[in-house]
Image: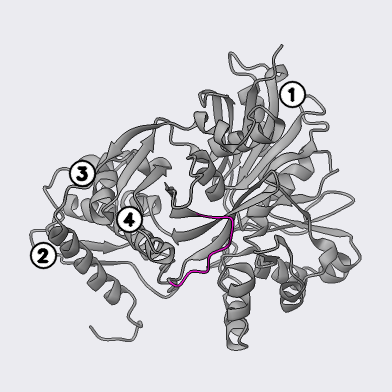
């Protein structure tokens, strides 16, 4: 029996999705298992690693039981994951010593501010391509090593293992034999030198992280480990693809040329553009990151994050109660011809790139007695698009060339009104694939390259096909009028709290 199917594990912030895909990109089976979010105090977000692991076991079991799926036809496993979420466990027992600290967690903000005051940020950006922010793994790990009794000394003795979610999953899938992370996840830790793709001694010293606790950095496509003792999967099945979720989506959208750009519209919106084989420092507040490493070649990307995208629609549903289901937002927004001058800044968790203002707050402007629910819904969708347009302008400036198109994925990319407005305010062609799960598809494509189902990166692109295109049609003056209203609203949203407006 031919081994020509790929198992993709997409471990996300609220659940784990597992898919079986063929080499043409068709999904043969899919299942999602959700797990609990833990909020021990304001600003803290945690996951129970054992709950994550049970979600993986459950989703794999359901997929393997699906009609038409035969584990004997699996050629390899690809893994993609929520990125900066940080875990620490006992090497001998495999037991976590603390709950995972999630990428959204803000508990290390004081530590980041202290390092900034000490003048560390320029060195951090030059070495890692990142900014000093609680978003990234390094300060989370430092917090665990300091706050868990005896953890730093145990880490120095090699008794503890650090990892992001990919590291944890590979460790468990391999029966505890592998302690690895791929280059994309390593590039999100504040601990890796971006140019050399190796752990950096200065960054380790800055955060007092012992080298003995770190995993080996491996390529994104190669035989990384093999399965041992996982129910339903044959021992020896290779794990041959790993990438953080946003890099996996870039690969899954076949953004293989310099300037190729994608945006994933999920809880937040994450835009990445391929910048080629050399890291490019941003002049506009974007992050530099590893996109993937395949067959000895590293590709880099610029990344911009809008923290709130689909979450703004959830807020309309759960916070304001003006829609019953998230899917209802498009119909409500279409009930009016325009937002009638209402602008929404989705700074419900501060603003990410290119503003990087954690103190910014959400804001509606332009409300009148005539404002209806439809205007608010339309303004929320437009606010998501405005944020992404900011990111794309920053990317274009850093590249020194206009972006010709952007490929989109994620749940909110199914919203036609949002996609058309995105094309209008960014002045860019939008391409949307038939299946919006580009993250899992990217993991499967990397696994296919890593196990030899695809001869090279280009051959994997047959798994990725655009289905619909959205073209901009607004005159330049009308587009600029929209952008001016947005810029004014952002200025108001970023005023200090004590400012009288």
Q: In terms of sequence position, does the residue under pointer 3 or pointer 4 come before the other?
A: 3
Of residues 168 and 370, the one nearer the viewer is: 168
Is 282 positioned to the left or the right of 64 in the image?
left
Residue 243's tag is none
Is 177 positioned to the left or the right of 431 in the image?
right
Quadrant hosting residue 149: bottom right
Q: Secondary structure at mark 4?
A: helix
Check disc 1 and report the residue beneath it. 232
Is 306 positioned to the left or the right of 183 in the image?
left
> Residue 203: horizontal and vertical position, in percent?
71, 73
Check disc 4 and report the residue beneath it. 384
Per the model, the C-alpha gap separating discs 3 and 4 is 16 Å
> Residue 358: horizontal and vertical position, in percent?
45, 73
Of residues 44 and 156, the one nearer the viewer is: 156
Of residues 9 and 201, the one nearer the viewer is: 201
Query: Do residues under tags 3 and 1 come within 8 Å of each other at their CB atoms?
Result: no
Check disc 2 and report the residue beneath it. 368
Please report the bounds of the magenta region as a residue range.
Answer: 275-283
Residue 290 shown in magenta: no
For label 3, count other residues whose C-alpha is less than 10 Å away and answer few (under 14), some (14-19) or many (20+): some
Q: Secondary structure at mark 2?
A: loop
User: Can residue 104 be seen from the camera position used here?
Assistant: yes
Q: In terms of sequence position, does the residue under pointer 2 or pointer 3 come before the other?
A: 3
Per the model, the C-alpha gap separating discs 3 and 1 is 45 Å
Frontmost of labels 4 and 1 is 4
> Residue 350: horizontal and vertical position, in percent?
42, 69
């Amino acid at each position: 029996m031919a081994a020509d199917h790929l198992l993709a594990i997409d471990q996300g912030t609220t659940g784990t999705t597992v898919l079986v895909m063929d080499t043409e990109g068709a999904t043969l089976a899919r299942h999602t298992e959700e797990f609990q979010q833990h909020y021990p105090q304001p600003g803290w977000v945690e996951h129970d690693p054992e709950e994550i692991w049970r979600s993986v076991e459950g989703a794999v079991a359901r997929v393997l039981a699906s009609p038409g799926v035969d584990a004997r036809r699996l050629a390899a496993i690809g893994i993609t994951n929520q990125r900066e979420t940080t875990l620490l466990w006992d090497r001998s027992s495999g037991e976590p010593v603390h709950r995972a600290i999630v990428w959204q967690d803000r508990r290390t903000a004081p530590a980041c501010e202290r390092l900034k005051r000490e003048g560390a940020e320029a060195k951090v950006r030059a070495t890692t391509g990142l900014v000093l922010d609680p978003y990234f793994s390094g300060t989370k790990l430092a917090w665990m090593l300091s706050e868990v009794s005896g953890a730093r000394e145990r880490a120095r003795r090699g008794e503890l293992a650090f990892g992001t979610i990919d590291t944890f999953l590979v460790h468990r899938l391999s029966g505890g034999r592998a302690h690895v992370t791929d280059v994309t996840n390593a590039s999100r830790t504040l601990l890796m030198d971006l140019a050399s793709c190796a752990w950096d001694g200065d960054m380790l010293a800055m955060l007092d992280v012992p080298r003995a606790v770190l995993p080996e950095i491996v390529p994104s496509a190669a035989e990384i480990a093999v399965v041992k003792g996982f129910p339903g999967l044959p021992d020896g099945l290779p794990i041959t693809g790993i990438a953080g979720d946003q890099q996996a989506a870039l690969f899954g959208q076949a953004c293989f040329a310099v300037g190729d750009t994608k945006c994933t519209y999920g809880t937040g919106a994450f835009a990445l553009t391929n910048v080629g084989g050399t890291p490019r420092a941003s002049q506009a507040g974007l992050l530099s990151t590893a996109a993937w490493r395949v067959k000895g070649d590293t590709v880099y990307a610029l990344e911009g994050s809008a923290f709130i995208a689909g979450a703004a629609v959830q807020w309309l549903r759960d916070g304001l109660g003006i829609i019953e289901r998230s899917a209802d937002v498009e119909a409500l927004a279409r009930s009016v011809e325009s937002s009638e001058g209402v602008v929404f800044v989705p700074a419900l968790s501060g603003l990410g790139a290119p503003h990087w203002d954690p103190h910014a707050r959400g804001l509606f402007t332009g409300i009148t007695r005539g404002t209806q629910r439809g205007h608010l819904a339309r303004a929320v969708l437009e606010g998501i698009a405005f944020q992404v347009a900011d990111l794309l302008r920053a990317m274009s400036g850093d590249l020194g060339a206009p972006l010709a198109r952007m490929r989109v994925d994620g749940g909110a990319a199914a919203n036609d009104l949002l996609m058309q407005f995105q094309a209008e305010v960014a002045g860019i062609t939008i391409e949307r694939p038939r299946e919006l799960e580009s993250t899992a598809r990217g993991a499967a494509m990397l696994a296919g390259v890593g196990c030899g189902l695809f001869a090279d990166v280009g051959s994997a692109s047959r798994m990725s096909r655009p289905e619909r295109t959205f073209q901009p049609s607004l005159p330049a003056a009308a587009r600029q009028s929209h952008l001016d209203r947005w810029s004014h609203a952002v200025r108001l949203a970023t005023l200090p709290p004590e400012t009288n407006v």
